[in-house]
Amino acid sequence: MKKLSIDTIISKIQNEECFHAVANDYSLTLKIDRYVNYACAAVHDGHQFRKPLWDNCLHTEYERWYEEDPETKSLVASHPIVLAGRDSRFEYDLNRPPEEAVFVTAWGKELWREPLSKDEKKESLEKHSNFYRVTHALMAKLEEKFGMAIVYDMHSYNWKRWEREVPTWNLGTSNIDNKRFGTDIELWRKSLAEIKFPREIKSTAKINDTFQGNGYFLKYITQNFKNTLVLATEIAKIYGDEYEYVLYPEIIATVEKQLRNRIPEHAAQFYRAHSPKL
C-alpha cells in the first residue's frame, strides 16, 4: 500500500489504474484491484482519533468504539474495490453532511471539555471533503465505464441496546429508488438472510427495521449519480460483544467468506438487469 495525495488518488482513478493507497493524512484507504461494476465501502470502520484532541474529549476510547463500526472493512476486504474511512466518527462523521459532521454532543453526552477552535474543525472538515472528492471520482469512473454501478455501504449496529428482537441484517432503503431497484433490494435481503453463522446465531434480514438508510454517504451518491444504487447494509454486532469490548474473529471470518461470493453474485444480477451496455 502506497501513501498518496488525494489529487494523486483521483488521478489514478481517472486513468483507470489499479492501486492500494492510504491518503497522505491517513484519513482513508482505497484499494482497486480491478475495475468492476460494484464497490464496497466502510465509512465508519475507523478508530483513529488525532492526538491533539485526546485531552479535550469527554468520551472514553470504549465509548467511541461502541458507536463505531469496527471490522466492517474486514467483512469486505477481499473485494476488488474497497473504500474505507480510518478516522473515528467522533472526530468527524463521514455519514453526515459537512455542517453536521463535527459533533458538539454525541449520543446524549457532551463531547468536548472546551469547544473546538476553527482550525481544529477545519482540519477535520478538510478530511471529510477529501473523502467525498475520492468518492465522487470513483463513482464517476464506474458509471462512465459500466453505465450502472452498485455500492455495498457496510455498517454495524449495537443490537443489545434494543428492547425488542432485531434482525441480524438491516437494509436502509428510504432514500433510494425502491420502484426502480425493488427487485435488487429484495434479492440482497434474501441473500443476507441465507448467511449461516456459528454458535447457532440466527440469521434474519429485514428492510428499514432498525435503520432507514438516512446516511450522507448514500444520499451523496444517490443525488449525484443517477445510475448507481447504494445498499446501506447493517449487520448487528453479533461478531463481538459490544458491552465487553471484544470481537470474535471466527465470526468475522465466517461472514467475510460468505460475502466473498454473495456480493459479486448480487452485483452481477444487478448488472444483467440494468446495464444499458448488455
Image (tube, rainbow, N blue to C red):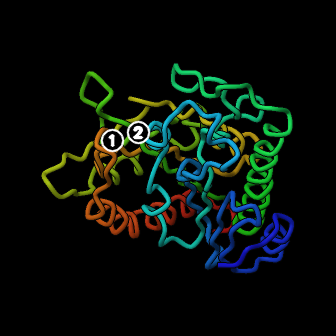
Question: Dot 1 lies on which element?
Answer: loop
Q: Quadrant of residue 243?
A: top left
Number of other residues with Cα within 10 Å of mark 1, as a class: few under 14, some 14 to 19, many 20 or more: some
Labelled disc at residue 38:
none
Q: Quadrant of the C terminus?
A: bottom right
| Position of residue 224 in the picture relative to residue 85 (left or right) | right
Instruction: Work out whether mark 1 precedes mark 2 in sequence or the reverse, and give the earlier one.
Output: 2
Q: On the image, numbered disc 1 is attached to which residue?
A: 242
Find the residue positioned furthest to the left: 200
The amino acid type, in three-letter code, at marker 2 is: Tyr
Which residue is at a point 34% across and 46% down the rendered structure image? 245
Q: Is residue 140 above or below residue 67?
A: below
Q: On the image, numbered disc 2 is attached to which residue?
A: 157
Which residue is at a point 52% across and 44% down the rendered structure image? 232
- Mark closer to the observer (1, 2): 1
The amino acid type, in three-letter code, at marker 1 is: Glu
Counting from the top left corner in percent of width and height, residue 43 is at: 59, 50
Counting from the top left corner in percent of width and height, residue 68 is at: 49, 43
Q: Is residue 137 above or below residue 216?
A: below
Q: Is residue 228 above or below residue 74?
A: above
| Position of residue 76 in the picture relative to residue 149 (left or right) | left
Question: Dot 2 lies on which element?
Answer: strand
Counting from the top left corner in percent of width and height, residue 86 is at: 61, 56
